[in-house]
Amino acid sequence: MTSPTFDTLLAPTVRVQKMIWTALAVGVAVHVAMAYVFLDMRGTPATAGVSDIVTTVISVLSGVTFLTTIAMRRILFADARVDAALARDDAATSVAARAHMASAGSSVQSVQEQLDALSDAEMHALDLAAWCTTQFIVLWALAESISVFGLTLSFLTGDIASMFPMVMGALVLLAISFPNLDPLLQRALGHRVSM
């Protein structure tokens, strides 16, 4: 069971993660809309001008990025990396929490008092949540790039349908990397309690 102070300090990190994830998911939808509008305005397909090699290269690059993102997810959140993040004893938590809370209207002194009230396990869990943000952004950027490949391909071919497999791939990757911190936080809280 975590303290209300922990939940208060964690909320800005979770909120930022979800806002970034949502922005990138909406970005995928915007790519589809852009392709639709652009191709509708252009009228004639440009398929004749695009070689099969370009189409193949973009498609293969998209597939490789998809597989790389899945591999990166396993690497970034591997047990050894999470344990290493939990074992860090730097001041990142207090700095991150101060920045979030100070921007929310709390004074730095007030934030320090809240941090002092946290248990060691809660401090490390809060640090892990901040650490996860960077890992998530890497995954989301890779997922979003697949959608950009699809947009590029649709512009080159004049066929909006050519982007749908890539858009679906991007959405699948975004869905599986939704920022659910609960398992990691439970691990962090259990990790520090059992040490």
Image (cartoon, rainbow, N blue to C red):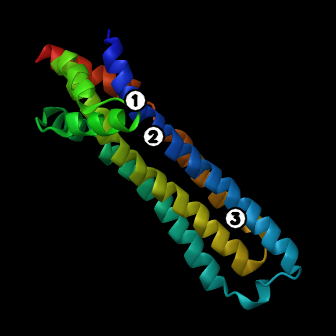
* Residue 135 image point, x, y percent: 35, 47
Q: Is residue 153 above or below residue 128?
A: below
Sequence-wise, the earlier of marks 2 and 1 is 2
Label 3, residues with CA under 10 Å away: few <14, some 14-19, many ≥20: many
Furthest toward the bottom, the residue is 49
- Please give left or right for residue 80 compared with residue 167 in the image: left
Please tell me which residue is depicted at 22% across the width and 17% down the height of the picture: 118
Residue 149 in view of the camera: yes
x and y, in percent, of residue 69 in the image:
43, 54
Read off the residue under disc 3: 163
CA gap between label 2 and label 1 equals: 10 Å
* Residue 6, image quadrant: top left
Residue nearest the viewer, comparing 153 with 122: 122
For the residues bearing labels 2 and 1, Cβ distance under 8 angstroms: yes
Question: Disc 1 marks which residue?
Answer: 181
Q: Amino acid at mark 1?
A: Leu
Dot 1 alpha-carbon crowd within 10 angstroms: few under 14, some 14 to 19, many 20 or more: some
Tell which of 5 and 56 is nearer to you: 5
The label number, if any, that marks residue 17 in the structure image? 2
Q: Quadrant of residue 90?
A: top left
User: Dividing the image into 4 quarters, which one contains the C terminus?
Assistant: top left
Q: Is residue 63 left or right of residue 10?
A: right
- Disc 2 to disc 3: CB gap under 8 Å: no
The three-letter code of the residue at mark 2 reads Gln
Q: As displayed, is residue 91 above or below residue 114?
A: below
Per the image, label 2 sits on a secondary structure element best described as helix
Residue at 61 percent across and 83 percent down: it is 54
From the viewer's perspective, is the residue at label 2 or at label 3 nearer?
2
State the residue at coordinates (10%, 35%). Answer: 89
